[in-house]
Image (cartoon, grey):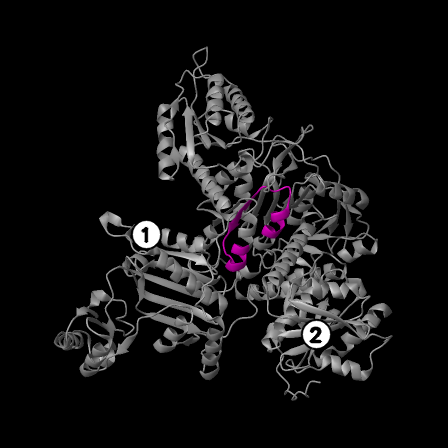
């Protein structure tokens, strides 16, 4: 029997518990604390719950709530009694509450409205109530569930927490610890991925689309979007909506005309997606109309939001809150639109007048102008897309959501993203790593050096510089390029060619000079080119075919670059059609040879690039051979795991003969068939480039990515160290935070002694430094430590500045120490200004810096560089996300440009990099185990031939943020 708990005073409303979440079906709900003002909502909610669900909740028939029940379920102290509700449209759809039953234990209970069961509401609520409980120092939940209530039992058992189950008095008694585990985190992220992917899929494959803002006369944005929908052959229903349509107007451009979305719903037709093309002042009314009509998502093309200034940002936030309150997701505002080329959908809900050909590339941009340029560039080079999204201000849906979707999308082999801001770098790198493990992710980032987000991009403030973000993206397997041209170049090669097995490149062609340029470019990109094979200017297409066949068959070759210039035909001039003949010869050789990447560099050969892109031959895929022969107009490409999936050949264009109407059953059947596509053979084009440097750079990106894939298949490990005392460190951190007033913005800077003690619990020994406020104290310190010693100034403006003369080394006697102390005071100021310390001398070595810091957006980052000018002036610092593996640590010290100084440069003795790797891993463990450790700086770390010495350490603590990327699922609220 638990003793009665002391009543807690009423707590302030915990607004930070509010969160928007994506549910299993792709819709959204808002989770928030229940308040006393929710009494009527609770009663209305309970009236809609079935008698069976009420019985499962209360273990007896319970048709209605009494006034006492309503009071109890709506009045909470937010410490010992907490209630959360999931709401849609402001109304409750589910509730959860816990009541504390012990110092660290509480009983939890759920109730989900029957119409919303199966949407994952209870699972989302469990994540959030568990996070709330941990914040309130509740570490264990208990629950009583009737044996027949299988759905609720499954919610608990599938959550991944460590739990115990027993059967008592006719009910199942569950007890589970709330400490997150690898299993619970994996479950949470798998649910996040499915939900966010589904929310994107609902927008890309709607059964019906309404365009709000269609003008009565030709012209205007709304009319253009409607025209593009029809032009793409959209397989679903379309509607034209304008509140100013006159009576008697029945259709516009072949689409039924309505004054509101509610008017469409009144006919019995559901609208899945709405494109909003009205002035910003009218958008709120449109959102309410759509929300009341059950619309699933909005594409807001309207401008005048965050890109227009602070007032516009306020309107954008209001738009987002309003849409989410109805469970809808938004692309935009200020969006260009979205395209899905799947045969079962054929959606062009954008301002692009022509749909791209069907292909294997997924494209996301945050800029309409860049989106237009990329669509044009891909079209010119014969490339097709699986889907295209231009998200504008991306108030809601972002690149993260589309990475979730493309990860499992069988129609996408390569993800290309143009980003101007990354709102959550930690989550983006996590999702990118997951997707890059199965298919390439290529990113070009604009606004890298502006120091702020572009207009319209409301994102959290991050202190992480662009160089750090770039390093973290590389760690996640992202192929980062510098320009949109490189984005297209890399995307074409990765979409159409198998990944190279290594860096060895064969070069062949009919121009010795172009071959040499290609050879030099390969060396610049650190590839291993073989000597170019000159076929001479007399070479005919058959000579190219034979040479390519030999190169592909060579086991010493991993990729082939073909260089070609116009040649002279029988009549003494370049013959028309020769480009098509050469393309056919190269395609045949590539189809017959082993699966290796092939690319062409050509100068002024008319029709060659187009003919190479229009693939017609069947070839082997990346991971295996074709399983069957493709039918007319279809082809296959391997998915990321080596299987085969169906797709259209590059020569196929979007069907423009489709109509704007059709039955829902037909569309649904087509979509179902599309998701169960049988594996068949695929065809590939060969990418062509107008310059050797561009082809080689794209190939080098593929080589590095393939190497990352091979290494990711055998990831490193996070080592265990027997001398780490995690529990003692946790206790020490808790005591320090409890006994000291903490600056919420800067955190708590530990004293040198406290920092040394905490680091020592993780096996990191910091050489003690004794304060020397006067010469006599300095001498006493030196006698205690033993000569020789160092005398160092530690004032902030002098620390780590040997160039200012604030360090005296190898002091071997009292006389020498007194002399050095006098010189230091004379040159730099009084002891109070200089803050001198005495420290033991250590052996010679290389001075390095090890740091870790937690950025509010990027999470914990481990950094390494050489001390002084290399890292401070040249920015030669490498970064990895925490927790770092043994492989990460080894790569970290080898990835800086000055790394040769650690490995015996110019005959010097190599230092103990093994000890350095261990230090990095111990720092990583400390920060990962204790999120309260927000920064660690070890400087300098002197690495010698045998071991290392940490001469200085700074540690900063702050209360842990329980609602970061490792907390419960939540949508960002910018």
Mark 1 neighbour class, 10 Å CA radius: few under 14, some 14 to 19, many 20 or more: some
Could you tell me which residue is drawn at 46 percent across and 52 percent down? 475
Does residue 570 sit above or below 896 in this rendering? Answer: above
Q: CA distance from mark 2 to mark 1?
A: 54 Å
Q: Quadrant of the N terminus?
A: bottom right
Name the quarter where the C terminus is drawn.
Answer: bottom right
Magenta stretch: includes residue 414: yes
Q: Is residue 624 left or right of residue 743?
A: right
User: Which comes sooner in the sequence, label 2 or label 1?
Assistant: 2
Name the residue at 75% across, 66% down: 152
Q: Nearer the viewer, residue 623 or 33?
A: 623
**Residue 189, horizontal then vertical, whole percent:** 61, 58
Q: Which residue is farthest top?
A: 571
Q: Which residue is mark 2?
A: 142
Q: Which residues are magenta?
A: 402-430
Q: Residues within 10 Å of mark 2 (few under 14, many from 20)?
A: many
Determine the secondary structure under disc 1.
helix
Disc 1 marks which residue?
Answer: 899
At x 56%, y 51%, the residue is: 434
Is 826 rendered above or below residue 20? below
Give the image location of residue 581, x and y in percent. 53, 19
Residue 824's disc is none
Q: Picture quarter containing residue 54?
A: bottom right
Question: Marks 2 and 1: CB-CB under 8 Å?
Answer: no
Question: Residue 931, how many percent across, how many down?
Answer: 49, 69
Q: Is residue 554 magenta?
A: no
Mark yes or no: residue 277 visible. Answer: no
């Amino acid at each position: 029997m638990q003793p009665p708990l002391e009543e807690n005073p009423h707590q302030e409303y915990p607004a930070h518990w509010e969160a928007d979440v994506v549910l299993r079906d792709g819709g959204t709900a808002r989770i928030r604390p229940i308040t006393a003002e929710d009494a009527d909502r609770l009663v209305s909610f309970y009236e809609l719950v079935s008698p069976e669900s009420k019985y499962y909740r209360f273990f007896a028939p319970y048709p209605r709530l009494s006034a006492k029940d309503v009071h109890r379920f709506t009045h909470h102290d937010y410490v010992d009694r907490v209630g959360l509700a999931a709401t849609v449209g402001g109304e409750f759809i589910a509730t959860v509450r816990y009541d504390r039953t012990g110092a660290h234990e509480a009983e939890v209970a759920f109730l989900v409205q029957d119409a919303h069961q199966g949407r994952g509401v209870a699972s989302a609520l469990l994540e959030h109530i568990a996070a709330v409980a941990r914040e309130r120092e509740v570490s264990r939940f208990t629950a009583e569930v009737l044996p027949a209530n299988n759905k609720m039992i499954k919610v608990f058992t599938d959550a991944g927490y460590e739990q115990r189950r027993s059967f008592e008095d006719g009910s199942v008694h569950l007890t589970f610890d709330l400490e997150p585990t690898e299993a619970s985190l994996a479950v949470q992220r798998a649910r996040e991925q499915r939900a966010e992917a589904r929310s994107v899929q609902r927008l890309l494959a709607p059964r019906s689309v309404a365009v709000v803002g269609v003008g009565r006369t030709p012209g205007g944005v709304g009319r253009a979007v409607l025209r593009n929908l029809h032009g793409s052959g959209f397989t679903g229903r379309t509607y034209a909506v304008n509140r100013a349509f006159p009576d008697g107007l029945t259709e516009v451009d072949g689409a039924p005309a309505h004054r509101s979305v509610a008017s469409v719903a009144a006919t019995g037709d559901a609208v899945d997606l709405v494109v909003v093309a009205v002035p910003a002042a009218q958008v709120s009314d449109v959102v309410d109309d759509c929300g009341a009509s059950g619309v699933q998502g909005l594409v807001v093309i309207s401008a005048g939001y965050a890109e227009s200034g602070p007032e516009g940002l306020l309107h954008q936030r209001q738009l987002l809150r309003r849409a989410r309150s109805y469970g809808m997701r938004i692309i935009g505002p200020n969006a260009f639109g979205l395209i899905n080329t799947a045969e079962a959908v054929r959606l062009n809900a954008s301002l692009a007048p022509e749909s791209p050909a069907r292909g294997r590339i997924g494209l996301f941009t945050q800029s309409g102008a860049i989106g237009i340029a990329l669509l044009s560039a891909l079209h010119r080079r014969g490339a097709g897309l699986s889907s295209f999204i231009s998200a504008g201000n991306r108030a809601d849906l972002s690149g993260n959501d589309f990475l979730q979707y493309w990860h499992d999308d069988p129609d996408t082999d390569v993800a290309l993203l143009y980003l101007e801001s990354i709102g959550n770098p930690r989550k983006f790198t996590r999702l990118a790593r997951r997707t890059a493990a199965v298919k390439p992710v290529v990113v070009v980032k604009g606004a890298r050096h502006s120091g702020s987000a572009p207009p319209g991009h409301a994102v959290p403030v991050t202190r992480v510089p662009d160089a750090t973000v770039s390093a973290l993206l590389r760690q996640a397997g992202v192929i980062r390029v510098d320009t949109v041209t490189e984005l297209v170049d890399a995307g074409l090669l990765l979409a159409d060619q198998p990944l190279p097995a290594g860096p060895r490149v064969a070069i062949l062609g009919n121009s010795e000079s172009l071959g040499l340029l290609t050879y030099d470019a390969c060396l610049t990109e650190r590839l291993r080119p073989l000597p170019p094979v000159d076929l001479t200017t007399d070479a005919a297409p058959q000579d190219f075919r034979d040479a390519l066949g030999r190169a592909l068959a060579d086991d010493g070759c991993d990729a082939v670059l073909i260089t070609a210039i116009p040649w002279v035909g029988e009549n003494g001039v370049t013959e028309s059609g020769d480009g098509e003949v050469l393309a056919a010869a190269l395609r045949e050789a590539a189809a017959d040879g082993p699966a290796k990447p092939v690319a062409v560099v050509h100068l002024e050969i008319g029709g060659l690039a187009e003919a190479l892109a229009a693939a017609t031959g069947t070839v082997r895929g990346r991971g295996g051979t074709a399983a069957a022969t493709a039918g007319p107009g279809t082809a296959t490409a391997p998915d990321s795991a080596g299987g085969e999936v169906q797709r259209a050949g590059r020569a196929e264009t979007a069907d423009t003969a489709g109509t704007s109407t059709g039955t829902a059953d037909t569309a649904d059947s087509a979509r179902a068939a599309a998701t169960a596509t049988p594996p068949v053979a695929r065809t590939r084009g060969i990418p062509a480039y107008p310059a050797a440097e561009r082809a080689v750079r794209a190939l080098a990106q593929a080589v590095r990515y393939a190497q990352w894939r091979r290494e990711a298949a055998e990831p490193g490990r996070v080592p265990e160290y027997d001398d780490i005392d995690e529990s003692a460190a946790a206790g020490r951190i808790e005591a320090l935070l409890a006994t000291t007033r903490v600056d919420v913005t800067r955190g708590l800077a530990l004293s040198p002694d406290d920092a040394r003690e905490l680091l020592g619990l993780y096996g990191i020994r910091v050489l003690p430094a004794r304060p020397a406020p006067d010469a006599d104290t300095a001498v006493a310190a030196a006698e205690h430590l033993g000569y020789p010693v160092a005398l160092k100034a530690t004032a902030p403006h002098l620390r780590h500045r040997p160039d200012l003369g604030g360090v005296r080394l190898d002091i071997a006697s009292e006389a020498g120490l007194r002399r050095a102390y006098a010189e230091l005071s004379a040159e730099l100021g009084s002891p109070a200004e200089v803050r001198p310390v005495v420290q033991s001398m250590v052996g010679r070595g290389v001075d390095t810096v090890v740091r870790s810091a937690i950025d509010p957006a990027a999470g914990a980052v481990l950094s390494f560089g050489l001390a002084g000018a290399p890292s401070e002036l040249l920015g030669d610092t490498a970064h990895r996300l925490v927790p770092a593996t043994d492989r990460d640590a080894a790569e970290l010290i080898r990835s800086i440009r000055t790394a040769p100084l650690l490995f015996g440069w110019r005959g010097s003795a190599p230092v103990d990099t093994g000890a350095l790797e261990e230090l990095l891993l111990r720092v990583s463990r400390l920060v990962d185990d204790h999120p309260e450790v927000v920064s660690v700086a070890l400087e300098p770390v002197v690495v010698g031939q045998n071991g290392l010495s940490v001469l200085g350490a700074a540690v900063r603590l702050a209360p842990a943020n329980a609602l970061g990327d490792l907390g419960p699922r939540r949508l960002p609220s910018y």
